[in-house]
Image: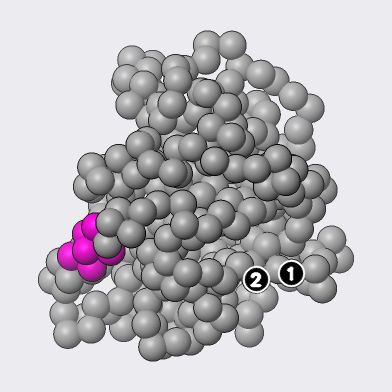
Amino acid sequence: MLTFEQTDFYEQNGYLMVEDVITKEQLNKLQEITYDFIESSRHVTKNDDIFDLDEGHSAETPRLTRIKLPHKQNEYFDFILKKSGVTEVLRDLLGENATLLTSKLNTKAPGGGMAVEWHQDWAFYPHTNDSLLAFGLMLEDVNLENGPLQVIPGSHKGPILSHHKNGIFCGAIDPDDPNFQREKIVTLTGEAGNMTVHHARTLHGSAPNESDRPRLILFYEIAKADAWPILGAGSYFHGLGQQKFWNDLQQRMIIGSPSLEPRVENVPVRMPLPPAEDSSSIFTTQKSGGAKSAFN
């Protein structure tokens, strides 16, 4: 699906925009399912296994930051990952064996929906090598006003910046870090059905949603099968035990089969420990960890 020029751009810059990666019918169904979830959140009064709530959420005005693990909440999200244009992009970038690490549907609410401070995904879940990426499938048009994803091109080839504050992992860099090259920021806007790709080491963030409509982006975070997680990172599967971990790993395979021979490379790692008081999501990690905002 991708051209040589696109794959080369990704390798050099650590991000990519892919247009019209799913069909109009697939997009319509994803939108319908997503708005049904938002509607069903009206009765929810606190964060639970499905929803992370934004400030001001109520039955009258549902405001979410995220739908958790959508591929587990509705099988169509899993279908899109495994049997659509999304899958073809994955093959072009990671090859024939790839594993889902997690999924999330960020439903940044209108009128000030929460920012995601600048960070590198790698800081949250280091692996034995860095063949990891994230897809961001736009379910509605994304423009400058509703909190689009922003990236620093080429930062995936640079250092892993500190995501700690006062000795605690806060899930965000210090915006005053001299290695944060703010002048290089690229903003990724696009139409519904487009998809961003960013490398796990690429610096990225997104501002609050100042528009009058939600910003809906479906994220899949993915690893090449021979990239194995390092114990101590914040993933649910570290506590499963061997047999349950193996069963879960097979369920998380997107394409191909698991690798029992981890590829170990000399990659920079700093463990995300000790954790913030509330590390249940990136939003709570950044808030309870006292992360300094780059968007004030």
Query: Would residue 35 be counted in the magenta stretch?
Result: yes
Percent x, y of residue 13 = 75, 52
The structure residue drawn at horizontal position 58% and vertical position 21%, both measured from the top left corner, is: 226
Query: Would residue 268 be counted in the magenta stretch?
Result: no
> Is 72 on the left or on the right of 295, as rendered?
left
> Is 34 on the left or on the right of 217, as rendered?
left
**Where does label 1 land, which residue?**
185
The structure residue drawn at horizontal position 13% and vertical position 71%, both measured from the top left corner, is: 43
| Residue sitting nearer the eye, 296 or 186 | 186
Q: In this picture, is 7 found above or below 165?
A: above
Q: Which image quarter: residue 240? A: top left
Residue 185 in view (yes/no): yes
The structure residue drawn at horizontal position 44% and vertical position 17%, both measured from the top left corner, is: 257
Kind of residue sitting beneath label 1: Ile
Percent x, y of residue 284 = 45, 63
Q: Count how many numbered circles sit on residues in the image.
A: 2
The structure residue drawn at horizontal position 86% and vertical position 65%, both measured from the top left corner, is: 178
* Quarter of the picture holding the N terminus: top right
Q: Secondary structure at mark 2?
A: strand
**Where does label 2 land, which residue?**
187
| Residue sitting nearer the eye, 244 or 97 | 97
* Quarter of the picture holding the C terminus: bottom right
Percent x, y of residue 100 = 44, 35
Q: Which residues are magenta?
A: 29-36
